[in-house]
Image (spheres, rainbow, N blue to C red):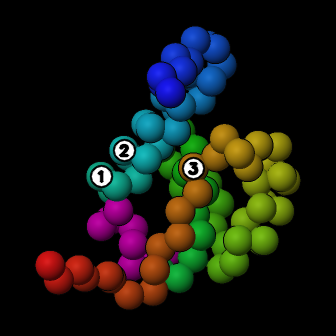
Amino acid sequence: MAAQIINDSVTVQLLSDFEKEAEWFFQKYNSFKDEYRGKYVLVKNKKIIAVASDFETLQKKVKELGLDITSSFIKYIPEKDIVAII
């Protein structure tokens, strides 16, 4: 099956925004990971705008902010760093 080309400008913009938020998150991760260990964070416009200890609470905060959860960049920051030994 051939890959489908996305040409919907709204979808392309959402994907582009998500990619930018993810890039910012991983570039800045070490600067805020200790502060938010064990929590879910919502990133918007290269800022952490909501934090919660559980996903359900973060979902409520996203709704209160008038954002769509499906187009929001949300990450869980583990309580301990994960190390992979290969």
Separation of residues labelled 2 and 3 (CA atoms): 11 Å
Which numbered disc, 1 or 3, marks the residue that appears first in the sequence?
Answer: 1
Viewer-side residue, 7 vs 45: 7
Evaluate if marks 2 and 1 touch, with contact meaning CB atoms under 8 Å apart.
Answer: yes
Disc 3 element = strand
Please give the residue where the numbered disc 2 appears in the rendered image. Answer: 23
| Horizontal arrangement in the rendering, residue 70 relative to residue 22 (left or right) | right
**Given the image, on which type of amino acid does mark 3 rest?**
Phe
Please give the residue where the numbered disc 3 appears in the rendered image. Answer: 73
Judge whether 13 appears above or below 51 on screen.
above
Q: What label does residue 83 carry, if any? A: none
Judge whether 30 appears above or below 84 on screen.
above
Separation of residues labelled 1 and 3 (CA atoms): 14 Å
Image coordinates for residue 78, horizontal then vertical, percent? 46, 80
Disc 2 element = helix
Image coordinates for residue 57, horizontal then vertical, percent? 78, 71
- Magenta range is 29-36
- Which quadrant of the view contains residue 55? bottom right
Please give the residue where the numbered disc 1 appears in the rendered image. Answer: 27
Residue 34 part of the magenta-drawn span: yes
Evaluate if marks 2 and 3 touch, with contact meaning CB atoms under 8 Å apart.
Answer: no
Image coordinates for residue 22, horizontal then vertical, percent? 43, 47
Which residue shows up at 25% across the image and 82% down it? Answer: 83
Separation of residues labelled 2 and 1 (CA atoms): 6 Å
Which residue shows up at 71% across the image and 45% down it? Answer: 70
Which numbered disc, 2 or 3, marks the residue that appears first in the sequence?
Answer: 2
